[in-house]
Image: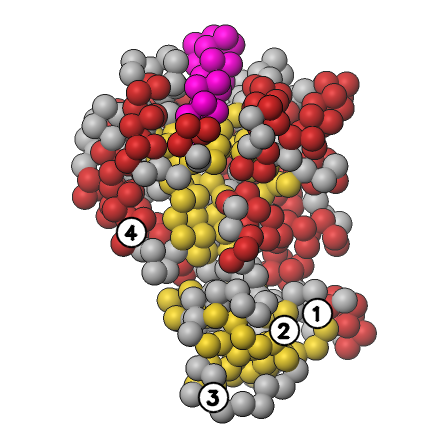
Amino acid sequence: MDTVIRNVRLLGRKGHFDVGIERGVFVRIEETIHAHVREELDGAGQLMLPPFIESHIHLDSVLTAGQPRFNESGTLFEGIQVWSERKETLTREDVKMRAKEALRWQVAQGILHVRTHVDVTDPKLTALQALLEVKEEVADQVNLQIVAFPQEGISSFSGGAELLEEALRLGADVVGAIPHFEYTRELGVASLHTCFELAKKYGRMVDVHCDEIDDEQSRFLETVAYLALSHGLKSRVTASHTTAMHSYNGAYVSKLMRLLKRSEINIVANPLINITLQGRFDHYPTRRGVTRIKELWREGVNVSLGHDDILDPWYALGTGSMLQVAHMAVHTSHMTGREEIDETVRMVSSRAARTLGVECEYGIAADKPASFVLMDAKDAFDMIRRQPPCTLVVSRGKVVARTSPASVRVIQDGKEHPVTFARPFAAREENAAQS
Ligand SMILES: [Zn+2]
C-alpha cells in the first residue's frame, strides 16, 4: 500500500480509523490497518472529510473590486454596469492571473471542485478562452466546471445567442441564462428556451442565474423547472440565487414547491452575496433577500451553497472559504438547530456534489479518488462555529496544501494558557456528537 493515514475521525461515524491509499485511490478504511506501507501519516485524531465544493463563483471577475470604481449603491445592477466598464480592459493574462490566485485561495481552504460562471457577453470571449486554459492548467488539482454565462442577456444583448453557442463549441461545460435581466418577461422566457435547446443540442448541463431580484413578480423559476422536466434534464439543471422566492406569497410557494420536487432540479443559494445585494430598494424593515434554503431542504429539494464573488463589483470582501458561506447560511436562514447546522456542511460538500454531477467520484470510501481534507474539529457543528483551517489538503493522493494552525496563548496569573476556542468536551457529549 502506498500510504496509510492513521487515527482520523469520519463525519457521522463513531471511533477512529486508519485510511489506506493506493495509486491515488482509497482502498481500505478500517479501525487498524495491518499492511506493508510505504508511507505513514499521523492524523492525530483530526476530522477527515471529502473536499469542499464551490457550487457558484465568478472567477473571471474576482479580485477586481474598485476597478475602475467601487459599486457605491451596492445593487446588483450597478455591479453589472461597473463590470461592463472593467470588461473593456480584460486581457487573457489578466483573467488567468486573477483566477489562478483565487483558485490557490480555494485549494488552501480545501476546495477541489469548482463551478465557475464566465461572462460570454463579450464579442472576443476573452474571459472564456482564459478560463478554458486555466481549467487545463489546474486539472491535476481542481475539477473546474465552466458555465457559459450571458451576463448582459441572451435576447437583450446583440449576438447574445450566437456568443452563447460559440462558448459551448469552444468547450464550456454548462449553459447559463439570466432571464430577470432581459428587457421583458417575454424575452426572459424566450432566453430560457434558447438555453435549454442549446443544452440538448450540445449535451450540456444547465445553470441559470434565476430571479436574483427582490421583485415578487419575477417567476422564471417555474419556467426553469418546467423545462427541466419536459426536456428530461432534471437533476442536470440548477437554478442559482432564486432570491425573489424570499418575497413570494405562501400560496404560490406551495404550488411552486410541487413542481420543484417533480423537476428534481438543484437550487444554489449564495447567502454572502444576496444578504449584501438584496433589500437595497427597501425602507425598514429591510428584506434579507436570501432564497428559502430551510424550506426547500425540508421539502426534499437539493440545495447547495456558493460564495459567488470574491473582491469584485458585487462583493468587495471574502477569501473564498466555504465555511464562511455555510456560517452565513446558518444566520440568514435561521438554520441554528443542531441538525440544521450539520446540514449546512452538506450544502458545501455532498449536496454540492449532486449539483455539479460529481457524486460518483466524491466521498471517503473504497474505490473513490483519495481527495480529502484534514481539519482539527470534533464534528460539523464545531467546524461551522470555529472555522478551523484545513491542516492538509490532498487531491487524488497528492498533497496540494498544508496549513499550520495558529498557536494562541493567553498570559494570566503568571502562566501561559493555550486557547483553541474548542469546548472542553465531556466524553458523553462527544459520543452524542459523533452519533
Ligand atoms: Zn452569480
Asked whether residue 43 appears in the rendered view, the answer is no
**Residues at marks 2 and 1 touching, judged by CB atoms closer than 8 Å:** yes
* Residue marked by disc 3: 37
Q: Secondary structure at mark 1?
A: strand
How far is mark 3 from mark 4, CA to CA?
A: 33 Å
Residue 153 or residue 354, whichever sits in front: 354
Q: Is residue 289 left or right of residue 149?
A: right
Magenta span: predominant SS is: helix
Q: Quadrant of the C terminus?
A: bottom right
- Kind of residue at disc 2: Arg
How far is mark 3 from mark 1, CA to CA?
A: 25 Å
How far is mark 4 from mark 2, CA to CA?
A: 34 Å
Q: Which mark is residue 9?
A: 2
In the depicted structure, whether residue 343 falls above or below residue 213: below
* Dot 1 or dot 4, earlier in sequence: 1
How far is mark 1 from mark 4, CA to CA?
A: 36 Å
How far is mark 2 from mark 3, CA to CA?
A: 20 Å
- The boundaries of the magenta stretch are 175-198
* Residue marked by disc 1: 13
* Residue marked by disc 4: 136
Give x and y (percent) for residue 365: 59, 67
In the depicted structure, whether residue 162 falls above or below residue 12: above
Residue 366 falls in image quadrant: bottom right
At x 35%, y 19%, the residue is: 161
Give x and y (percent) for residue 98: 28, 46
